[in-house]
Amino acid sequence: MLAPSELQQFFPVVMTPSHDGKFFQNYVASMLNFTVQSERTGMRMQVLMHQGESLVTRARNNCVAQFLANPQWTHLFWIDADIGFSAQAAFRLLLSGYDELRIQPDGFMEMTEAPTGFMAIKRSVFERLIASYPDLSYVPDSIGEADLGLHYRFFDVMVDPVTRRYLSEDYGFCRLWSGLGESVYIDANSNLTHQGAKLYRGDFASSLLASLPHAVGGPAGAAMVLTGQEYLNPNPPAL
């Protein structure tokens, strides 16, 4: 983990796609708290609420293009409109030092894929993806979306060539990154809420201990071993 003082060098933009412009209470309360805590730490941040695009893959790629067009932003921080989180959870992602099944002393663990509901990505990640996958560029046709030569299909569905699994756009993004020999990390110590018909709360650390294969999407009944359990120390719960 980087020192908390490093936050003053960051300028993340929170991107939240919502095709109908609706944002849930847990998200709004969390964002208000995150904004206040960011100001107290001296970290600059901005929030972009993207609406009007029903195709989530295109919405995410439009957001990436807007991020790339502003070189001042250091991180693209995806937070979905139905996710609740603590400011500490957000700061931990930014301070992890990772570009993105051993639990490290800081509580992070490497995974093959992760959802974009709460994901921070460094600018350098997109710069490398652009250089490595130039054929993924495309011309946008969304109304009001300017063509700045920065649109790429980094977030798109795909079929795993080995397992034939149909992967969503966030998992597809992770596969592009891992295809370059890089890794994706998740914070096992931060818990989120997910708003639907009711507010769902999870505890990933407890899930790892109770049912490791289920928690990480492994084969049912697989004999898996988790090392680094002593580093599981959940931080304050999400709002």
Image (spheres, rainbow, N blue to C red):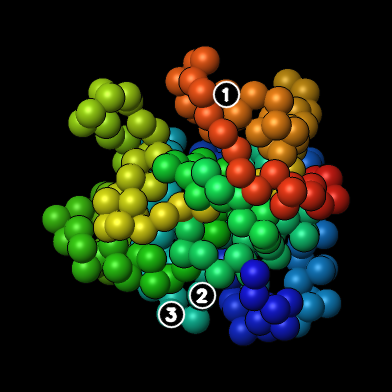
Disc 1 residue type? His
Badge 3 vs badge 2, beta-carbon distance below 8 Å: no
Q: Quadrant of residue 25?
A: top right
> Is residue 21 shown to the viewer in this render?
no
Q: Nearer the viewer, residue 44 or 232?
A: 232
- In the rendered image, which residue does mark 2 sit on? 74
Instruction: Label 3: state its secondary structure.
Output: loop
Q: CA distance from mark 3 to mark 2?
A: 7 Å
* Of the image marks 1 and 3, the number of the one nearer the N terminus: 3
Location of residue 66 in the rendering, given as x and y in whole percent from the top left corner: 42, 65
Mark yes or no: residue 188 visible: yes
| Mark closer to the observer (2, 1) | 1
Q: Is residue 35 above or below residue 9?
A: above
> In the depicted view, which residue is nearer to us: 40 or 108?
108
In the image: residue 90, left or right of residue 20: right
Location of the C terminus by quadrant is: top right
The numbered disc on residue 214 is: 1
Foreground mark, 3 or 2, reads 2
